[in-house]
Image (cartoon, grey):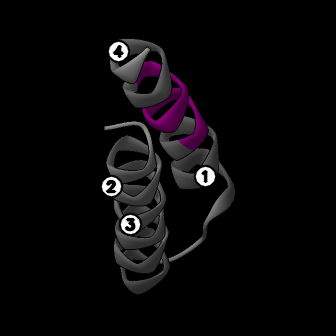
Amino acid sequence: MVRKIVTLGLVAGMFTLAACNTVAGAGKDVSSVGHATTKAADSNK
């Protein structure tokens, strides 16, 4: 289950990176995906 969540997070992150226009925007996007993935993993313990 966690593997599926992480995979989904990585795919979402790739789409997010493709959509952002600046390096700062990419950093914020990656951070938000990381936080979402962590929250999802914590809720499935």
Q: Earlier in the sequence, mark 3 or mark 1?
A: 1
Q: Earlier in the sequence, mark 4 or mark 2?
A: 4
Q: Which residues are magenta?
A: 7-12
Q: Which mark is residue 16?
A: 1
Q: Amino acid at mark 4?
A: Arg
How far apart are the alpha carbons under marks 4 and 2?
12 Å
Q: Earlier in the sequence, mark 1 or mark 2?
A: 1
In the rendered image, which residue does mark 4 sit on? Answer: 3
In front: label 1 or label 2:
2
Q: Earlier in the sequence, mark 1 or mark 4?
A: 4
Q: Amino acid at mark 1?
A: Thr
In the rendered image, which residue does mark 2 sit on? Answer: 38
Q: Amino acid at mark 2?
A: Thr
Q: Quadrant of the C terminus?
A: top left
Residue at the image position 47 percent from the left and 15 percent from the top: 4
Mark 4 nearby-residue class (10 Å; few <14, some 14–19, many ≥20):
few
How far apart are the alpha carbons under marks 3 and 1?
14 Å
In the rendered image, which residue does mark 3 sit on? Answer: 35
How far apart are the alpha carbons under marks 1 and 4?
20 Å
